[in-house]
């Protein structure tokens, strides 16, 4: 089983971090993974995306051109990557950052007001992790067994112990995403 995922948005939205968390979560479970970041020269405010591949066999290429799953945190990312999503694929969109809906009938789309949910729960800047939680909830069969528990282990591995408060905020955001 190979699942190819693109996380996309503006620099500063935590796109690369969300992808890295998913990749670490799958790695903790013994999956083969790749994580390939890509960002424009502007960094914060410019475009950013990352490709994550999760497989039970070695991965031939980390580059994802036709994702099974797309996480889009803004309209330009949604516009750019939506046509490439494979039939029967999944798109999860931050509906606060894009008003457009997909017209495709061969994919499943979830529209989550992630930025609003983050703001309302005093988790500003955590829309990325809310969308990661929604991904884990909606696509468990495509993520090689990744759960909220493995994501929490990944947070504890990636985020330094000296930033314990950030670990707890990420866990809260992930939980919110899994309930919406």
Image: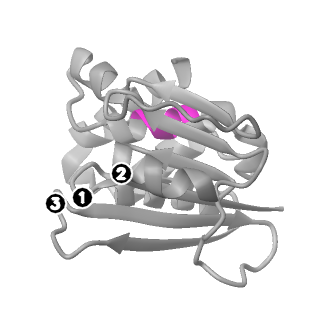
Does 72 appear in magenta?
Answer: no
Q: Quadrant of the N terminus?
A: bottom right
Asked where in the image residue 66 lies, by quadrant, the reply is bottom right
The mark that comes first in sequence, 3 or 1, is: 1
Q: Residue at x 24, y 15 (%)?
A: 120
Residue sitting at x 21%, y 48%: 163
Instruction: Say which residue appears at 68% left-offset and 57% top-offset.
Output: 29
Direction from residue 11 to residue 36 in the image, left or right: right
For the view shown, which residue lies furthest in the bottom direction? 60
- The residue where tag 3 is placed is 44
Horizontal and vertical percent position of residue 95:
40, 28
Q: Quadrant of residue 62?
A: bottom right
* Residues rendered magenta in the picture: 130-134
Contact check, label 3 and label 1, Cβ < 8 Å: yes
SS under mark 1 = loop
Residues at marks 2 and 1 touching, judged by CB atoms closer than 8 Å? no
Q: Which of marks 2 and 3 is nearer the N terminus?
A: 3
- The span from disc 3 to disc 1 (Cα, nearest Å) is 4 Å
| Label 2 Cα crowd, 10 Å radius (few <14 / some 14-19 / many 20+) | some
Q: Which mark is residue 11?
A: 1
Residue 76 numbered tag: 2
Q: Distance between the residues labelled 2 and 1?
A: 12 Å
Q: Residues within 10 Å of mark 1 (few under 14, many from 20)?
A: many
Q: Closer to the camera: disc 2 or disc 1?
A: 2
Q: Nearer the viewer, mark 2 or mark 3?
A: 2
Q: Is residue 84 visible to the viewer in this orientation of the structure?
A: yes
Contact? badges 2 and 3 (CB < 8 Å): no
Crowd tier of the residue under label 3, counting other residues whose Cα lies within 10 Å: few below 14, some 14–19, many 20 or above? some
Q: Is the magenta stretch mostly helix, strand or loop?
A: helix
Q: Residue 152 appears at what percent x and percent y? A: 48, 42
For residue 3, side relative to residue 26 (left or right) = right
Q: How far apart are marks 2 and 3 (CA)?
A: 15 Å
């Amino acid at each position: 089983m190979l699942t190819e995922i693109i996380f996309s948005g503006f620099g500063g939205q935590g796109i690369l971090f969300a992808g890295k968390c998913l990749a670490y979560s799958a790695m903790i479970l013994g999956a083969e993974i790749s994580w390939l970041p890509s960002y424009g020269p502007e960094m914060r405010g410019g475009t950013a995306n990352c490709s994550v591949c999760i497989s039970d066999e070695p991965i031939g290429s980390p580059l994802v051109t036709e994702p099974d799953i797309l996480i889009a945190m803004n309209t330009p990312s949604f516009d750019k990557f939506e046509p490439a999503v494979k039939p029967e694929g999944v798109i999860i969109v931050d509906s606060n950052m894009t008003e457009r809906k997909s017209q495709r009938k061969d994919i499943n789309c979830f529209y989550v007001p992630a930025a609003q949910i983050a703001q309302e729960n005093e988790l500003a800047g955590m829309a990325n992790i809310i969308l990661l939680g929604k991904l884990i909830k909606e696509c468990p069969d495509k993520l090689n067994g990744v759960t909220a528990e493995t994501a929490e282990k990944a947070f504890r591995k990636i985020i330094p112990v000296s930033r314990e408060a950030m670990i707890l905020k990420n866990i809260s955001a992930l939980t919110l995403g899994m309930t919406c």
